Amino acid sequence: MTGQERSEEKSECVSLSPMMEAVPAPPESERVCVFGTGDLGRSLGLRLLQAGYGVVFGSRRPHSRSSLLPHGAQVLGHAAAAQSAHLIFIAVQREHYDFLVPLANQLKGKVLVDLSNNLRKNQYPEANAEYLQSLVPGAEVVKGFNTLSAWSLQNGPSDANRQVYICGESVEAKQAVIAVATKLGFSALDQGFLSVARELEDFPLQLFPQWRLPLRISIGLSAAFFFYLLIRYVIYAYVTQGEDISFRIMVSLANQVCPIVSLIMLSLCYLPGVLASFLQLYRGTKYRRFPNWLDRWMLCRKQLGLLSLGFAFLHVLYTLIIPIRYYVRFKATERTVSVIRENRTTEFDTTTAWRGDSYLSLGILGFGLYVLLGITSLPSVSNALSWREFSFIQSKLGHLTLLFCTAHTYLYGWNRFLSSSTYKWYTPPGYMLCLVLPSVVLLLKLLLITPCVDRTITRIRQGWERGADQRNPKDSQPLIP
Ligand code: NAP
């Protein structure tokens, strides 16, 4: 350090701890520097202090920033701050990175952690981290921590935000960043070289990428069944009987659409697994790639399942409010009054009681398992389960949920499947249509668990290949293109 720089540091240094002079400064390995005293810089600084690091902020205006910064941190000018630590977090917007160019000498050999994000994808020709590396070629740039928000840093690593992704050219530099991340309570995932930086910068800009297809499916199904049921019930009643039952749109129709969409989406969650098993059986090997559409479908099963749970939950809520509906109370009173007036007696029908109770019981069991599936798909819960436990719940109990919910719907239909009055304008009711897919999935699953098929599929999954001895190795399609 030159004499001029030393005096610059002395004049610019602002200690935020009244005890700072008495407390010996931590060694350089335990000291980190944060350039930028904005939202992210301050939150990161606070967490670093809480983890036991000495924190030195680099700022354009160290004197005016001191009151904003966490207690115990130091704030210096950029040049002096850069010399106080080996690892420097750059919590400054990319547009201002040119302030680093005159600091090239002080930054030589230092690890610069690029935290920056962009407002939109492809905003700049190169990744921010690559741009930073080009401005300061003597430093080791590591991209990382950019997927965290200032808010989540202040709150500590929660279950949903435990991972930080990093990438960079230098293994030592990445190890230094991983050590800090680990001490802060995060698990750092090394994604490779700096060329991956753009991907990491695009990550926070993603808008529910894995939810898009399931959301589209659920919206499409809801809209299609809503209009189908509107025609079959409300418009049919108006056209054929001149009756206005449009008020039923709000609860009755919604309470039909929700279970229908829920059951179809639950079947769509289990159908790709069944199709994949049949494909492996047909090919006689697991060493060939599934078609892209099947891969994509399998990757969004969790989202399909969670959305289907959401619709099931709405169905439960709509069902629970049935007794307090004006229409239901009016009809019940009217029926009771007419029975009394006409002095009629009604026989207790045990079959109907059995049917009603079984229908409700299967619905409750199905929903209970549904909730269990939803809970075990949460990362904090699934991380605590062994692979066998997870697959038992998601596969075995998942198919059982589908069975219960399908049986619940069959019991709802009961003898109406054979009654011609059910088929208004020659169309089947919604619940009959929604039974097609789950019935197919359950039948196919039944085939797969028959002992001879199950044995073959288990062998295939353990690596056995049909006709492997005779086949030319060049014939098999590689898994990685
Ligand atoms: P911010 O609140 O605007 O703070 C940026 C800081 O940069 C300022 O406080 C300032 O500190 C410094 N600065 C501003 N203009 C400068 C210039 N011309 N030259 C040198 N330094 C300058 O921004 P932020 O929200 O903390 O974000 C900082 C970086 O982290 C951004 O690249 C952002 O994309 C990224 N990031 C932010 C979050 C978040 O939740 N906020 C999350 C992930 C990533 P001084 O006045 O002390 O010099």
Image (cartoon, grey):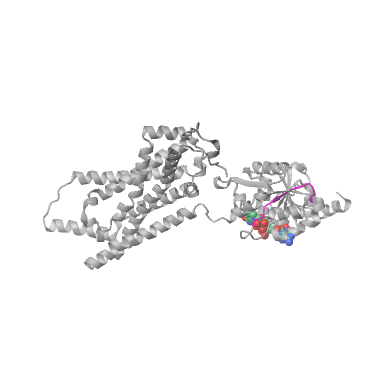
Please say whether residue 100 is one of the residues in the magenta stretch: no
Residues 128 and 464: in front is 464
Q: Residue at x 38, y 36 (%)?
A: 449
Q: Residue furthest left?
A: 343
Q: Residue at x 42, y 33 (%)?
A: 456
Q: Residue furthest right?
A: 3
Residues 210 and 108: in front is 210
In the rendered image, the quadrant that contains the C terminus is: top right
Q: x%, y% of residue 299?
A: 49, 47
Q: Is residue 245 above or below residue 448?
A: below
Name the side, left or right, on which 228 lies relative to 25: left
Q: Residue at x 72, y 44 (%)?
A: 170
Q: x%, y% of residue 188?
A: 63, 43
Residue 369: name its quadrant: top left
Q: x%, y% of residue 198?
A: 64, 53
Name the side, left or right, on which 150 lies relative to 18: left
Q: x%, y% of residue 421?
A: 21, 57
Name the side, left or right, on which 71 lies relative to 293: right
Residues 298 and 474: in front is 474
Q: Residue at x 85, y 51 (%)?
A: 6
**Can residue 365 be seen by looking at this rendering?**
no
The magenta segment is 107-117
Name the side, left or right, on which 413 lies relative to 169: left
Quadrant containing ligand 1 reads bottom right
**Can residue 324 be seen by looking at this rendering?**
yes
Q: Say how many tags the image has.
A: 0
Residue 53: name its quadrant: top right
Residue 361: name its quadrant: top left
